[in-house]
Image (cartoon, rainbow, N blue to C red):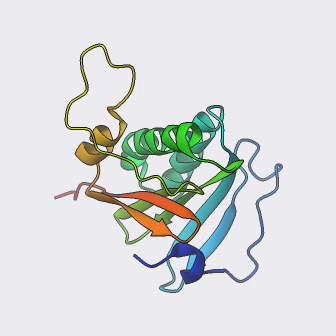
Amino acid sequence: MNDLEHTTRASRGARPTSAAESPTVQFRRLQAEDGSEVRSRTLPRETASVPVARQFVREAVTDWELSGLAADIALIATELTANAAVHARAEVIRVTVRRVTDGRVWVAVTDRSREMPVLKTAAGADAVDGRGLTLVDSISLNWGVDRLPWGKRVWAELEAPRVA
């Protein structure tokens, strides 16, 4: 996937949502070049941003009538945001969610650290951390890390189960 910052443009009439429109989550509504909707939110790089990111992605998939993905995308956003809150350098991180197709969603957390995350093959029973990317790997359709000139973007894709 191309660098989302370069491949998105504000949709006609797009503006940040006011607190009155959404009291819990404020975000920018963007549109990718292919016309798919993108939502992006900049958050402080702190652990208190984790539940905000979780709520943000849940609301997006619910608005897109993909509420069947809400629990999984919330878990992925939790893990990616928590990792960025602990390991990134700058004061803020960016959470982005994109409706790729009718049933597929892409979520990413972008930060200013060039340190790449590591998928640990086994975390000990007593380990407090080290399982996040393993969860992302097991839940997502695919995931990866994009190096950026000033940091990285860790992303995952999910697909809603097809109804027969």
- 47 or 104, which lies in front? 47
Against 162, is 72 above or below?
above
**In the image, 52: left or right of 68?**
right
Q: As rendered, which of 66 and 94 lies closer to the eye?
A: 94
* Rendered residue at 64%/38% (across/down): 49
Point 49% across, 40% down: residue: 83
Taking depth in this image into account, of 133 and 29 the one nearest to the observer is: 133
Q: Position of residue 116 (x, y in %)?
A: 41, 53
**Horizontal placement of 51 versus 126: left or right?**
right
24 or 78: which is nearer to us? 78
Residue at screen point 69% across, 48% down: 43
- Quadrant occupied by the C terminus: bottom left
Point out the residue furthest to the top here.
126
Q: Is 55 displayed left or right of 120 in the figure?
A: right
Percent x, y of residue 153: 48, 61
List x then y, in percent, for residue 134.
Answer: 27, 39
**Left or right of 32 on screen, residue 122:** left
Question: What residue is at 32 percent from the left and 32 percent from the top?
Answer: 131
Work out which quarter of the rendered image holds the N terminus and state it.
bottom left
